[in-house]
Image: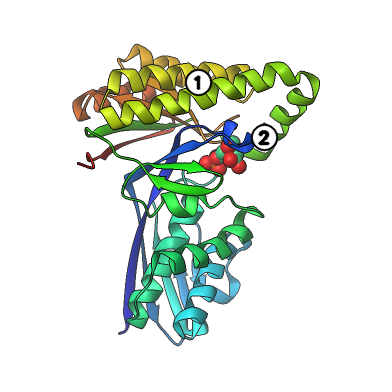
Amino acid sequence: LRTGTGTAHGKSILIGEHSVVYGAPAIAFPLHDLEVRVTLTVSDKPVIKSAVYNGPVATAPNRLRPPLTALREAAKWFELDASKISLEIDSPIPVERGLGSSAAVSTAIVRAAAALSGKELTELERFNLVQHAERVAHGTSSGLDAHAVAALTPLLFRAGVPKPLRTKTEVTVVIADTGTPGKTSMAVGGVRAMRENDTQLIDSLIAQLAELTAAAETALGAGELAELGHVLSQAHRVLHELGVTSGELNRLVYAAEKAGALGAKMTGGGLGGCVIALAHDQADATRIAAALAAAGATHTWVSTLAATE
Ligand code: PMV
């Protein structure tokens, strides 16, 4: 039995969503504890085993087009016969919540295909193959997800170019799902419309987010978690003024802060999706996660990132 296995993880935007659209940097935060695993097996009757579909590859639903694109592109690159490969996709990441589900699954597939072929996979090859699938999933794609789901450190994105950030201390976050899909294109369109109406106001909010992102970079590098938390909570308030939060997101941010989080904000496009809350440590995170579940979160995850030095 010839098989190859690959993994990747989820991501969240720590800070800088929406302002990144106007040229400011954003920080992506890898969620190593949300791990996707894909196993590819050479087979005469290829099937897909996944949470959304179990059956022959030939009759897979449309929503599996992005991972199948990743498989096709990777198979071409590694000279494998894509029509004779079964996929088993094991992913804890919910879709359409800004957590990088599609990029993580595609990355795991590309890595599994490399393992199956016994060939080397460079970072650039992995990125380019995943971007093919991301364009099928999202139309255009900034590349942030494709980098972040394979990253070991937080990444600062400026003009689409990732720069690894140092973290002086371990960082533990709680991610909580409102249960409502994020509506990124609607949120981005809403900000654009508001900006047409009152450019000065929206530009000043975008500038505030850019300043907060710079402050978050400094706080991460210095290991100043209390300061980082404060910055995240402030960013949520600015995002609220930009009109991209929701009642559910605000409720979860409030619940996290009340439960002792150092700070909390929505993450990703907004109008749904998830919040990210910063905890002191893992015990604190468990308490915050319970409070978020009690406040209506449909799912919570705790993810810890080790210090980079
Ligand atoms: O929800 P996500 O993780 O796809 O992030 C959207 C981030 C935005 O800044 C709102 C949009 C963008 O294209 O950068």
Quarter of the render that holds ligand 1: top right
125, 145: nearer the viewer = 125
Which quadrant of the view contains residue 86? bottom left
In the image, what residue occupies the spot 27% across and 23% down?
224
Residues at badges 2 and 1 in contact (C-beta under 8 Å)? Answer: no
Q: What residue would you read off at disc 1?
A: 236
Secondary structure of the residue carrying tag 1 is helix
51, 168: nearer the viewer = 168
Secondary structure of the residue carrying tag 2 is helix
Mark 2 or 1, nearer chain start: 2
Residue 164 pos. (x, y %) = 36, 46
Q: Which image quarter is the N terminus in? A: bottom left
Q: Considering only vertical position in the picture, is 1 above or below 287?
A: below
Residue 295 pos. (x, y %) = 42, 19
What residue type is disc 2 on?
Answer: Val
161, 63: nearer the viewer = 161
Q: Does the numbered disc 2 mark a residue whose Cβ is under 8 Å from ligand 1? A: yes
Judge left or right: residue 204 versus residue 228.
right
What residue type is disc 1 on?
Answer: His
Residue 97 visible here? no
Q: Residues within 10 Å of mark 2 (few under 14, many from 20)?
A: some
In the image, what residue occupies the spot 69% across and 16% down?
201
Residue 30 pos. (x, y %) = 37, 44
In the image, what residue occupies the spot 50% across and 20% down?
236
Q: In the drawing, what numbered circle is on residue 188?
A: 2
Q: Residues within 10 Å of mark 1 (few under 14, many from 20)?
A: many
In the image, what residue occupies the spot 49% across and 50% down?
145
Q: Please, which residue is most extreme toward the right here? A: 197
